Image (cartoon, coloured by chain):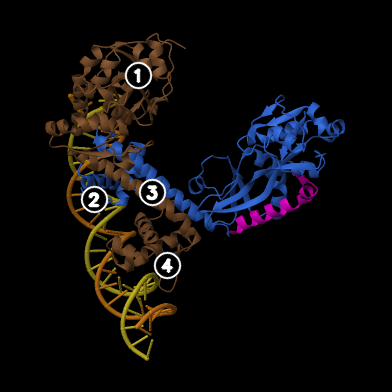
Chain colours: A brown, B blue, C yellow, D orange
Amino acid sequence: MSDRLPPLTALRAFDAAARHMSFAKAADELSVTPAALSFQIKSLEEHLGAQLFRRLNRAVELTEAGAALAPSVADGFASLAAGWRSAQRFQDEQTLTVTAGPAFTAKWLAPRLYEFAQAHPEIELRFSASLRKMDFARDGIDVAIRFGSEGDPGMYSLPLADEWVAPVMTPALAARFPTPESLTSAPLVFDDSINFLNPPCDWTAWFRAMGIDFAPHHGPRFSQADHAVDAALAGVGVVLGRRALVVKDIDEGRLVMPYGTAIPTGARFRFLCPDGSENRAQIVAFREWMLAEIDKTTHITEALTILNVPGS
Amino acid sequence: MSDRLPPLTALRAFDAAARHMSFAKAADELSVTPAALSFQIKSLEEHLGAQLFRRLNRAVELTEAGAALAPSVADGFASLAAGWRSAQRFQDEQTLTVTAGPAFTAKWLAPRLYEFAQAHPEIELRFSASLRKMDFARDGIDVAIRFGSEGDPGMYSLPLADEWVAPVMTPALAARFPTPESLTSAPLVFDDSINFLNPPCDWTAWFRAMGIDFAPHHGPRFSQADHAVDAALAGVGVVLGRRALVVKDIDEGRLVMPYGTAIPTGARFRFLCPDGSENRAQIVAFREWMLAEIDKTTHITEALTILNVPGS
DNA sequence: GCTTCACTTAAGATATACTTAAGTGATCAT
DNA sequence: ATGATCACTTAAGTATATCTTAAGTGAAGC
């Protein structure tokens, strides 16, 4: 029972055998003969000083010690494999895997994807469902777009444009509600996805910033911001839209911001990637492209007055 | 750039080199010559098709790919080592590592330890600070004692005695407050450590179970149950004590439960160990001993009336 | 009772990993 | 400047670990 780690090939053989619960299948997976695998397991058991498998008639089963060893070993090899893949990814300048929340994916990335593909036909973009606690190496993520107020240590973190929110609606609806005051009788749509912000950026805050004493609560509520914007696009009502999610619709005339005022959210989208990978070709291309795309709609922000929200 | 994992000895060499940021020190750690280590790193780089280290004058530094690989590889080997240790632990029938919360450790385990050592001199007990989310393999834990209402999948889980709570105090204090009603004017001590229970097991619930309309809020509060019991032992006041934490003090006369009634908590302490290790000699010994110890004080529970708490 | 299946064992072959020894280039002390 | 030292590299030879082939065991299934 030596103190140090046993031969790693033996551990790998054990891992495969424990996964398949069969020496023959494990040998097949590792492209060796069953004899070699049997030998490896035996050598591992000698190192440990105890059996890891109980040999039955035509099968094997893990002993208690084997059962204790198997999950950690599986984890260990999974981690090694993930690390290896993430190192290999540096070799690959063709693919780029991006993760973002559903709203940003639907309202920012998706509508602009065609243009990115035009500008960088050599890069194959992949999207990964947004994960709350994501591990770049484990999940094969190159870049994450995240909304919030802070970066991460050990991460390259580029803040994108300041996010404000402002009432947006279809041009038809805007004609019926020409002034901020008239909004008190308009159909309001609520976006619950930014309720976590502090100070809050909801309708009550917006009316307060405009000097109007009105705290609306009735109207359709959406837990995802893109669905709220979709509702506004359908003419259902007026929504307090986040910059990144509405500027393209505004630029192209599907939505309007009739009052020329917005309130700041204090948060912003960030471009995140592991430290050291910010200079990989496809990541540079994607970042530059995002910044250029954001630049295309800054004229919308410049035409706005960003108000402060007074304390309640 | 092969798809499969590179030679594992090369990965181990890389791990050591990345930790030491020196091939020479890594070679020393692995008890090989620097030449061997250099060769391993080179072979790994050939497998990857890219450099992992930048060779400087008298030092090395990780490339971006190396920096991406290093943490996952370190994790991976840590996991393999943890698994190996936990398998080795099955060979060892001498030591037993137990984790429990601070209250159980202070009020149940510590006062009875001497007796366990007498009964099982061959077993060396070790205690590990309680960790919220503990990993038996990683932290070298054999047995955990946890308070709650549920077991864990993949775990051997033995429920210990039902836990009730009842007012406990020094005999001197009991003389001054002979009836439950008189407790409304007694100094009450609050144990906040079981606030998470549902239904709650606080003073308000106890008075309600006794048919007394009284919801006390004033008095010293403790976030750890053992400190509340210590306060009661010091004669500071009356505390609603959990069975496991007070039976020994009651059995030995330091505390009394003058009213003969208790209310159930709906939760209990559990004896947890990884599936498969419940038959290891020292774990059997510890479990049997705990059950026997609990049995020694069941007469206290048998003398009690366990009340239900009516809904509010 | 014979075949088959899954693992084991033993002997020889081969690939892997290690050591020794010589070499490179840059730093550092004189 | 000059030579010593340090950290890594390279090459050749060697040892060891790992594989394959081939024969063997014992239980299950036809």
Q: Estimate the x, y position of residue A27 in percent, counting from the top left.
A: 31, 64
Place of residue B204 in the rendered image (x, y in percent of width and height, measured from the top left): 71, 32
Classify residue A164 by image quadrant: top left
Q: Amino acid at mark 1?
A: Ala
The foreground one among A10 and A76 is A76
The kind of secondary structure element at disc 4 is strand
Q: Which residues are magenta?
A: B280-306
Find disc 1 in the rendering and name its residue. Answer: A186
Q: Is residue B296 left or right of residue B71?
A: right
Q: Name the dominant secondary structure of the magenta segment.
A: helix
Residue A180 horizontal/vertical position (percent): 33, 12
Protein chain holding label 1: A
Q: Which residue is mark 2?
A: B3
Label disc, if present, on residue A60 of the rendered structure: 4
Residue flagged by tag 2: what amino acid is it? Asp
Q: CA distance from mark 2 to mark 4?
A: 30 Å
Q: Amino acid at mark 3?
A: Gly
- Give the left or right position of residue A52, taking residue A115 as reference: right
